[in-house]
Structures are given as C-alpha cells and as structure tokens.
C-alpha cells in the first residue's frame, strides 16, 4: 500500500541534492487522471485501479476500508465523531487477518497471524490511534479539496436523494467535489453527469473488484475531470 | 493543531530515536537506528498503513497532533522527525 518512490531519473541527474518526490515525477495520462481522486467507499475498487496504474497516494480513511452508504453519510454528517474510540472499536480475526470494526467502517490490519489476548488489545490500540489520525486527515482533505472524492455502490436504492445527502454532508466540512458511481448497462457506461456544483454522477458497466480490468475507471475519472475543470 | 507538553525527551536525537524505534516496531523489526536520509519506502516491511500507524503512535507518545497536510510530503525518515519536532511546543 505504500507510496513507491519514482524519482530515479532525477536522482541520477542530481545525485547529491535531489531528495526524491513522487509529486514531481511525471505521471502517465491514466495515472495523472486517477491521482486526482480519492475513495469514500464502499470498497477499495478505486484504490486498486489507482494501484494498477501506479498511483499510490498517502493512506486515507476510506481508501482500503469497507463501508456502506448509510454509514458514510452518517459519518460525514457528524464528522466521524468518536472514530477511534476504544469503547466503540472491536477487533476480529476474519479469514486472513485482523479487522478493525467501527460504527462507520471496517478496516484491514497488517496483522496476519493470530495473537493472544494481550496481542489483540495491542492491535485495537494501534488501530484506534490510526483511525483518529485518518479521521483528521479526511476532514482536512475535504476542506482542502485537492482531490475529488468517489463513492461507489452497487446498491440499487442509491439514487439522486442519496447523492445529494452525501454532498450536503461533505459541503458542511469543505468544498471538495463528489463523484457518485453506480452500475449501468453498456450504453451508459463511462458517462458522467454534473448534478450540481461539485456533484457528479458516473456510471460503469461493470464493477471489477478486485482484479480489474480498470479501463472504465480511467475513462470515468477523465470525463469527470473535464466536467469539473470546465465549471 | 494542539500542542501539549510531552512526557518524553524532545531533543532532536531523542525524537530521531523514537521515530526509528517506532518504525521498526510497527514493521515487526528489531529496533535499529534507521539512517535519517533513508527513504521510507525502503524501511523493511513498510506499507502505507504501518507508516500511518507509526505516526499515530508517535503522536500518542509525544502527546501531540501533527499537521496532517505534511503526510502528503513524507519521503524520508527525517521528514517524520521534522513533523514531530514542528508539532512540539517550544521549550
């Protein structure tokens, strides 16, 4: 998940002075488009598309997390109050690793071997501290509006009212734009519609978590950027 | 950003040691003194979650809150030392 350094060429030219910066490394067109977006849920499909094209951003709260529309909306409306509180955070071993469960989201951990009671308490302690930091980062990212946030869902009940609720909740925090992605048939795939200032509805023909191909994501994000920059 | 008095020594060397120890700890490595100019991507066993976890635990250790926009610019071990130092109250 960690950002790989991509400054090799610059290092070669300025070996002693250049510290390396992924931000300064030219990105391909697909990566350049995808790097302007960050996930708000429901799962990590956008993050996988970004990784596929070499985009590794600093970790954000919902990039690799699992959640639902209702939990994200509720979380945004209360600024994820209480996230990282040990009283509402549990840890459970699921299949291959420990997962952190909160009222808003579920998060993988890096702990892939069973632990004793003391070890599980440490996993929870580390998870709570990390969630509190990620909560502050998300609120700041929405306020800074450097990236467009993406909420993707296959829920057939997710419509215009739900998109507007998410956007209103975000707007109370900051001006970042929101792209809501749902699934439609081929005729409407990769189409983006501007619903309001900073609110876009996009359609994909297929959700491809976890293996891709991710070409539809590139097309969708590129189209969204065109609309966003034109407004 | 809130700045509270740390329970720990906050000299540059102490911060550097704390950062090095914490990175090794969250990455499941024996504590070693990581070079300050070491790229974070080259810390053994590191990933983005472990990196944020280390910073979150350092916030607890020093009783500080770092400026989160700085997370976008982290490249090397010394960058973490710098954001910790910046968040500490001046003695």
Image: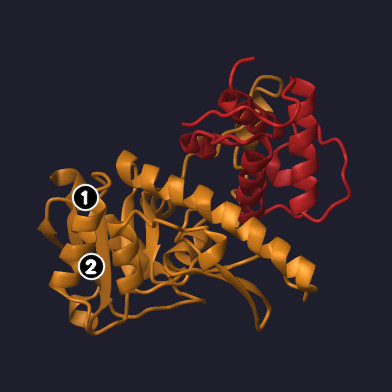
Chain colours: A orange, B red
**Residue A77 image-quadrant placement:** bottom left
Q: Quadrant of the C terminus of chain A?
A: top left
Which residue is tagged 1?
Answer: A171
How many tags in the picture?
Answer: 2
Are the residues under badges 2 and 1 in a single subunit? yes
Name the one closer to the observer, B86 or B78. Answer: B86
Q: CA distance from mark 2 to mark 1?
A: 19 Å
**Above or below A128: residue A22:** above
Residue at x 13% of width, y 59% of height: A194
Residue A202 has which mark? 2
Measuring 60% from the left and 25% from the top, which residue is drawn there?
A: B88
Examine the image and state in which quarter residue A161 appears: bottom left
Callout 2 secondary element: strand
Viewer can see residue A219: no
* First along the sequence among labels 2 and 1: 1
Left or right of A39? Residue A210 is: right
Q: Is residue B73 left or right of residue A74?
A: right
Q: Position of residue B31 (x, y in %)?
A: 87, 44
Given the image, what chain letter belongs to the residue carrying mark 1? Answer: A
Q: Quadrant of residue B19?
A: top right
Q: Check residue B38 in the rendering and tell me which mark sits there, or answer none.
A: none
Query: Which class describes the residues within 10 Å of circle 1: few (<14), some (14-19), or many (20+)?
Result: some
Residue B45, image x, y percentages: 76, 55
Name the image quarter holding the N terminus of chain A: bottom right
Whether residue A151 appears in this view of the structure is: yes
Callout 2–callout 1 Cβ contact below 8 Å? no
Q: Is residue A146 above or below residue B81?
A: below
């Amino acid at each position: 998940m960690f950002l790989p350094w991509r400054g090799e060429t610059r290092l070669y030219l300025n070996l002693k002075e250049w510290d390396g910066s992924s931000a300064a490394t030219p990105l391909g067109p697909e990566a350049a488009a995808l790097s302007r977006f960050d996930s708000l849920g429901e799962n990590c499909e956008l993050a996988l598309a970004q990784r596929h094209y070499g985009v590794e951003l600093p970790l954000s709260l919902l990039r690799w997390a699992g959640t639902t529309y209702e939990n994200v909306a509720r979380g945004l409306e209360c600024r994820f109050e209480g996230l990282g509180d040990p009283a509402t955070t549990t840890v459970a071993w699921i299949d291959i690793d420990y997962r952190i469960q909160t009222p808003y989201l579920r998060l993988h951990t890096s702990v892939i071997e069973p632990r004793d009671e003391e070890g599980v308490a440490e996993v929870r302690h580390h998870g709570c501290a990390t969630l509190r930091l990620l909560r502050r980062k998300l609120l700041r990212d929405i306020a800074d509006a450097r990236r467009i946030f993406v909420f993707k869902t296959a829920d057939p009940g997710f419509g215009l009212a739900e998109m507007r609720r998410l956007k209103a909740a975000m707007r109370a925090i900051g001006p970042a734009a929101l792209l809501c992605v749902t699934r439609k048939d081929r005729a409407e795939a990769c189409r983006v519609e501007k619903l309001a200032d900073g609110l876009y509805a996009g359609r994909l023909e297929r959700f491809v978590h976890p293996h891709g191909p991710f070409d539809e994501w590139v097309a969708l994000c590129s189209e969204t950027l065109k609309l966003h920059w034109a407004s | 950003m809130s700045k509270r008095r740390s329970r720990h020594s906050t000299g540059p060397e102490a911060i550097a040691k704390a950062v090095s120890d914490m990175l090794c700890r969250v990455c499941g490595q024996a504590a070693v003194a990581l070079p300050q100019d070491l790229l974070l991507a080259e810390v053994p066993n590191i990933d983005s979650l472990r990196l944020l976890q280390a910073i979150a635990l350092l916030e607890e250790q020093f009783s500080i809150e770092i400026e989160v926009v700085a997370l976008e610019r982290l490249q090397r071990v010394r960058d973490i030392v710098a954001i910790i130092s910046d968040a500490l109250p001046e003695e």
